[in-house]
Image (cartoon, rainbow, N blue to C red):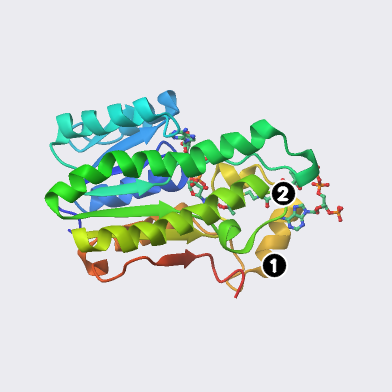
Amino acid sequence: MRLLDKVAIVTGAASGIGFAAVKRFVEEGARVVIADFNEEAGKEVAEQFQHEQVKYIMTDVSNRESVKELVNQTIEQFGQIDILINNAGITRDAMLYKMTDEDFQQVININLTGVFNCTQEVIPYFIKQQSGKVINTTSVSGVYGNIGQTNYAAAKAAVIGMTKSWAKELGRKGINVNAVAPGFTMTSMVEKMPQHVIDKMVDMIPLQRLGKPEDIANAYLFLASDEASYVHGHVLHVDGAIMM
Ligand code: CAA
Ligand code: NAI
């Protein structure tokens, strides 16, 4: 068991990649908090696990008070935090000339400020215990850019900048910080894309398939485990080599 006795917060874990991570982490012995904005889905997925092992806490990562509450409740219920997976994210795709201020700001608030909020609230616990793992979710779009994703690519590129800054700041405190950059992965996010764009993307992937949520969950698991203790400030691409 690679995460025995560890407590992980996974944001955006009521569906898709985050939910796959919860299942994988539980298999490896972790206790997990599902921190998600979607209360109905969050409660429903948490019920699939034993209550002592998985808890749902309603969280809006873009809201500082909500994140404080998440951290307080996690400590209250599980007594510790060892792993933070900043996985929550949204898309509001539009061509630059059609993108509204609201589309832009909402993506920044959740995909960028949300990562800042959660990490800043959790980090005092990690510093106190001189250990902890922060894993941020960026994207192939944040590394290479993508049509229709001005807002999303900006936020995801900024997450890489934060990951590297935190690796430099927090390494000396025994805290590992890394990011995972998924490629196009079969979740509701990709389901919203026009089919002809999905087809174009699959054509570009040497493995000739989209990613599965489990492919990304396994990368989170590796970075969260002791096996990755000397992996630090890294952006792990899990994308079938779409842009190689
Ligand atoms: N790659 C290549 N070409 C693309 C493209 C893409 N990602 N997105 C759009 N295009 C092309 C279209 O094929 C179209 O080409 P033609 O003019 O030759 O027909 C042109 O750009 C304009 O597109 P639309 O007619 O669709 O324009 P629209 O204004 O109605 O919609 C859009 C624009 C909202 C960006 C829509 O095209 C779209 O949703 N595209 C997909 C954007 C995308 O890739 N999002 C990723 C979502 S998954 C995710 O975000 C996870 C992750 O981290 C990767
Ligand atoms: P998803 O839409 O299935 O899951 C995202 C989850 O985040 C949802 O459960 C949603 O309720 C939650 N969420 C949204 N706003 C929130 C908020 N303010 N506070 C808390 N939770 C919130 O999407 P998916 O694909 O599982 O995405 C997970 C992460 O992976 C995201 O950061 C996404 O940007 C990233 N990613 C996804 C890729 C893909 O192709 N699916 C590719 C690259 C990155």
Residue 228 left/right relative to 17: left
Amino acid under disc 1: Asp
Residue nearest the observer in this picture, 67 or 46 = 67
Sooner in the amino-acid sequence: mark 2 or mark 1: 2
From what the image shows, is residue 54 above or below residue 142?
A: above
Q: Residues under labels 2 and 1: Cα distance?
A: 19 Å
Q: Quadrant of the C terminus?
A: bottom right
Q: Which mark is residue 203?
A: 1
Left-right relation of 130 to 109: left
Whether the residue carrying mark 2 lies under 8 Å from ligand 1 is answered with yes
Q: Which residue position is annotated with label 2? A: 148
Taking the image as drawn, is residue 236 in sight? yes
Above/below status of 31 relative to 65: below
Q: Which image quadrant: the N terminus?
A: bottom left
Image quadrant assignment for residue 223: bottom left
Type of amino acid at the residue the image marks with label 2? Gly
Residue at disc 1, secondary structure: helix
How far from the left and from the top, in percent, is residue 20?
39, 48
Which mark identifies residue 212?
none
Circle 2 residues within 10 Å: few <14, some 14–19, many ≥20: some
Residues marked 2 and 1 touching at CB (< 8 Å):
no
